[in-house]
Image: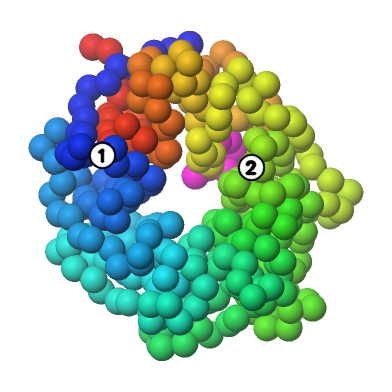
Amino acid sequence: MYPLSCSDGFKYPGSEPTYITDIIPLSGGLAAVSSDQSLSIFDPLRLNQGPLKRVITNHGNVSCAEAFSVGNSVVATAGENGTVSLWDMRTGTAALQIGTPGDGPGLLSLACSEQTNTLAAGTELANHQASILLWDLRSPSAPKIHYDEVHSDDVTELSFHPTNPHLLLTGSTDGLVNVCDTRITDEDDVVVAAFNHGSVHRAGFLNETEVYAVSHDERFALYDMGETVEKGSPTLDLGDIRKVVDCQYLCNVIPKVTGAGAVIGAGTQDQELFRLIYLTKNGASWSLDSGSVVGLPGGHGDEIVRSFCVVDEQQVVFTAGEDSCIKAWRPSS
């Protein structure tokens, strides 16, 4: 295991712990969403100086956040009162709010396509219905598409395809990971690929045709939209990832932009350890690279790491957790 050292960090003040639920790298800094309902942006080279800008979101309880424009430092947030906001973190101001608080069900997931000016949101199950809403941000007064039958339970994950912004991956506690063609409005035809994985906690595209899925009971598997694979069956099924990599929880999976691998963040609270484990592809087969594990000894103590990101060109890993802290990790000098 190759260890990194904590080189910088910031702890949110207050007598009660603040959970930092997500960190999002932007051109203007590192954005962070936290349980005090704030969205902040930090200088990634000077975390210890605290937020450069901080706004209080207006969702009742913020549940999800995604970068809408990395280059322009615009972040989308959504939450329990059914609203979506876009924030320009260069100025710390709200660029747009969609929806009226309380008019619709709570939102649990977001996906953004700057290329098509589209924002997608997934709802919780309410009145026996869970929906996927898509807005054209050039005319956001009402959703341009409203899918009500793609899932039958909470929509927990959304992700646009890396090269085709019309394809939207959706995941739900109903057990399904679907890929939808959003050019199709007929719900009988909108799903172009479906994988029955189990209650979906994390899911996304690895590359043009392959997707990963992690269930709430930590089952990890890969699937392929290609026709060469038996429809719906996994190309790699690791079962309970906790047993495979000897951890207590999986934080997230971050695909590499090349499409040839991914980084799995796994935590072991008993050992106060967080590790980055590389999923690599050799030919047509995927495997975990046990020889290139990166360790963050000390982690966030015995608290859970809720989010991480890797900035390869700067050789730094950022983590955020339930201990009120954001940390930067670098190779020891």
**Which residue position holds label 2?**
216
Judge from the rendering whether residue 110 lies leftward or rightward of residue 74; answer left or right: right
> Quick check: can you spot residue 245?
yes
Q: Which residue is mark 1?
A: 16
The segment highlighted magenta reads 256-264
Residue 142, position as x, y percentages in the image: 47, 87
**On residue 155, which mark appears?**
none
Q: Which residue is painted at 66% across and 57% down in the image? A: 172
Q: Is residue 47 magenta?
A: no
The answer to whether one can see residue 313 in this image is no
Query: Disc 2 vs disc 1: which is toward the camera?
Result: 1
Please name the amino acid that badge 2 sits on: His
- Up-down relation of residue 172 to residue 114 (above or below): above
Q: Say whether residue 259 is magenta.
A: yes
Considering the numbered disc 1 on the image, is that residue within a helix, a strand or a loop? loop
Q: Which amino acid is tagged 1?
A: Glu
Of the pair 85 and 304, the residue shown nearer to us: 304
- The spot of residue 329 in percent (x, y) is 30, 24
Q: Residues within 10 Å of mark 1 (few under 14, many from 20)?
A: few
Query: What is the secondary structure assignment of the residue under circle 2?
Result: loop
User: Residue 238 location, x and y as percent?
Assistant: 73, 30
Crowd band around label 2 with a 10 angstrom C-alpha radius: few (<14), some (14–19), many (20+) = some
The front one of 69 and 187 is: 187
Seen in the picture, residue 208 relative to 310 is either above or below; the reply is below
Q: Position of residue 119 (x, y in %)?
A: 46, 71
* Callout 2–callout 1 Cβ contact below 8 Å: no
Could you tell me which quadrant the C terminus lies in?
A: top left
